Image (cartoon, rainbow, N blue to C red):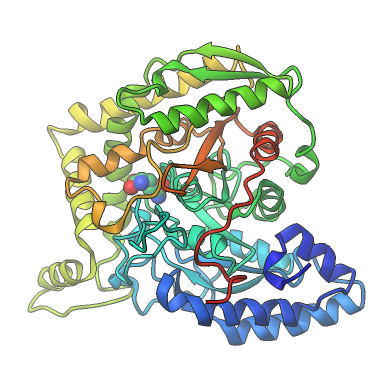
Amino acid sequence: MSSLFDYTLASARDALRARKISAVELVDAHIEAIERLDDGLNSFITRTPEQARLAAKEADAALAKGEGGPLCGLPIGLKDLFATKDVRTTAASKILDNFVPPYESTVTANLKQDGAISLGKLNLDEFAMGSTNLTSAFGGVMNPWQRRGSTAKLVPGGSSGGSAAAVAAGLVLGATGTDTGGSIRQPAAFCGIAGVKPTYGRCSRFGTIAFASSLDQAGPMARNLQDCAILLESMAGFDPKDSTSVDKPVPHYEAALGRGVKGLKVGIPKEYRIDGLPAEIAAVWDQGIAWLKEAGAEIVDMSLPHTQYGLPAYYIAALAEASSNLARYDGVRFGERVTGASLDALYEATRAAGFGEEVKRRILLGTYVLSSGYYDAYYLRAQKVRTLLQRDFLQAYEKVDVILAPTAPSGAFAWDEKPTDPVQMYLNDVFTVPASMAGVPALSVPVGLDSHGVPLGLQLIGRFFDEETLLAAGSVLEKAASFTHRPTIHAGVSA
Ligand code: GLN
């Protein structure tokens, strides 16, 4: 290894166990990289170097005795949507600016239990609502990738934009993300890393600040799928504190990576060839099809007939749930408070000052679609569409094992190219939302660069609780693509 920034999570794990490197030097190098690069990238909201250094010393002591969990000594970052005990947790909202949870989310507790070391809390779109990370009350995140010959700031995608940027820039070896309608997969694609949205119920939602509870799912983001598999194995599992977490044994995901795709049926859904799909995106998709075929998969043209209703139904269902979930931020129990002459005035002033524009828009729309007279026309109908979307996938999986599609209809765009019309913005989620509505697992892997030199990802969507087949197929794409490009801004490149 020429530098501590060439390690993946897997190779660093092995080097730590073999005592080739120490946790202290690994963690120190990453803290130094954050100090060097993150004032510009803004991928962290809260840095926790003191706690990390302490944990690294303990990790070295454990490793010296041949002890320590499977992630012992590995520096990671946590999306600031996961409650962390005694560490400020903001959801990138002003309304939670001063919120220090007295408890830890199950997912982050699992990672820490296994020895992972958090370097801090990562930036995101406010309450995970967005696809650009520009809705954060703590400022936007800069994608470490730049277009060839340009220094224009690109978005890292969202909502897990801080997680994706920090991993891509080499500031952490892996990170947690959450995905409600694409928030792991789309930023992973925009930043040239891998991300897995597990089956709904695979990871506990306890202590993850809720956006849309029936869709929210935690998952790993890392430089490759092996690292994602390692993180997912730690994050996943039944949790009595979350009634939607599923009591199923957690497989050894890493072992599934080498299974290959021989004999596997890979579906190509015709509805994803949307009008106006950029030629570059269509080309990487075709390339992905060719790679899987070469590796022995059978390619099956198929249909997910209700795809076109996925996006509108998502933006009703998710917003309805958001309006209900965010009712708790009233200035009485959590976070910021702006006082008023009456209790109602206090609520109004607090919420007016505490929430950003996109969050307010969603609360208003969500409240509208749930209100009497509109409930049947919007909310109930969206739920029916959701059932149809689910049925599309269930029927598809009678014929195919996995589905291959693009992750997003574009690569990363510039901060100032963000559509001003929110509906235009929502269209970026067109390929990720259906799997979320159905609850099935999906992942994104980087497979190439667009004509500007910015990464593009491909998405694989799998059967309920069959993350293993997804990882196996994803791994074939990963090998064929051998994506080794690095972004302009990277910890291993001195300025
Ligand atoms: N971009 C989508 C939205 O804005 C998805 C967000 C997410 O998955 N958290 O709702």
- Would you place residue 68 above or below residue 134 in this image? below
Q: Residue furthest right?
A: 65
Residue 251 image point, x, y percent: 76, 42
The image shows residue 341, relative to residue 191, as above or below, that is below
Residue drawn 76% across the image and 77% down it: 23
Quarter of the image where the N terminus is located: bottom right
Q: Is residue 10 visible?
A: yes
Q: Residue at x 18, y 71 (%)?
A: 353
Image side of residue 17 versus residue 404, left or right: right
**Could you tell me residue 217's position as x and y percent?**
51, 47
Query: Which residue ends up furthest to the front in the rendered image?
Result: 149
| Residue at the extreme left of the image, as rendered | 341
Q: How many marks?
A: 0
The residue positioned 54% from the left and 16% from the top of the image is 396
Compared to 421, does 44 lie above or below?
A: below
- Looking at the image, residue 226 sits to the left or right of residue 189; the answer is right
Q: Picture quarter containing residue 31?
A: bottom right
**Spot occupied by residue 269 in the image (x, y as percentages of width and height):** 47, 19
Residue 207 shows up from this direction: no
Q: Is residue 259 above or below residue 23?
A: above
The reply, left or right, for residue 195 in relation to residue 408 is right
Q: Nearer the viewer, residue 136 or 285?
A: 285
Which of the 4 image quadrants contains residue 341?
bottom left
Which quadrant of the view contains residue 25? Answer: bottom right
In the image, residue 243 lies at what x, y percent? 54, 46
Identified at 84% across, 82% down, the residue is: 61
112 left or right of 446 in image: right
